Image: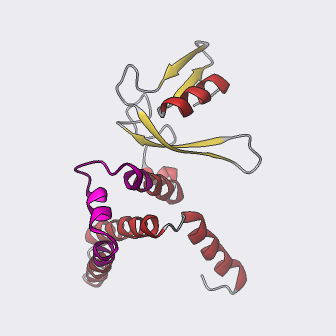
Amino acid sequence: AYMNEESLRRTLAEGQTWFWSRSRAELWHKGATSGNTQRVVGVRLDCDADALVVLVEPRGPACHTGAVSCFGGSAGAAGIGVVLEELYEVIRGRRREMPEGSYTTYLFEKGLNKILKKVGEEAAETIIAAKDEDRAALTAETADLVYHLLVLLVERGLPLEALAAELAGRRAGEGNE
């Protein structure tokens, strides 16, 4: 969606996405009529500062068609990197806000030992699913493992960028991908 200076200013001030409709020549608040709002958890500039990525916690589908995304409608279409960044930002938000009733809040309240225990459990369950050749279980358990690893990264203050740099360095350097 398109943002002008005013819609960006409102987005940053209110923590909800606002856009500029070029066809109607007016501001619009995402979800004002549908209820499918987007809570902003992060805003990033690209390398030459001419485009933004607004990371959100959606309350319903983003697209007017009812699809999750206007770019293909699925997490797979958005790419794993986008999904991981969004999830990481949601987890960071949970760490900051500690909303009552959230499983992520529970993990942070219980502390590092609980988080490490869950990483270990999910790793073991992923191994079993792979060994049993159960594709659906492998997908689900891997997703659980990745989620708990992201909780661990947030708990220890390790940004995704550090992980990305390490992996990129390994690939470029020694060919140890």
Q: Residue at 48% of width from left, 34% of height from top? A: 15
The C terminus: image quadrant: bottom right
Q: Residue at 51% of width from left, 56% of height from top? A: 85
Whole-percent x, y for residue 88 in the image: 46, 57
Q: Is residue 96 magenta?
A: yes
The answer to whether residue 59 is above or below residue 85 is above
Q: How many marks?
A: 0
Nearest the camera: 95 or 131? 95
Q: Residue at 40% of width from left, 26% of height from top? A: 31
The answer to whether residue 89 is above or below residue 39 is below
Whole-percent x, y for residue 132 in the image: 24, 82
Side of 35 relative to 15 (left or right):
left
Predominant SS of the magenta segment = helix
Q: Residue furthest right?
A: 48
Q: Would residue 2 be visible to someone looking at this image?
A: no
State the image quarter where residue 3 is shown.
top right
Q: Would residue 111 be visible to someone looking at this image?
A: yes
The answer to whether residue 98 is above or below residue 160 is above
State the image quarter where residue 146 is shown.
bottom left
Whole-percent x, y for residue 17 in the image: 50, 31
The N terminus: image quadrant: top right
The answer to whether residue 107 is above or below residue 171 is above
Q: Which residues are magenta?
A: 92-118
State the image quarter where residue 34 is shown.
top left
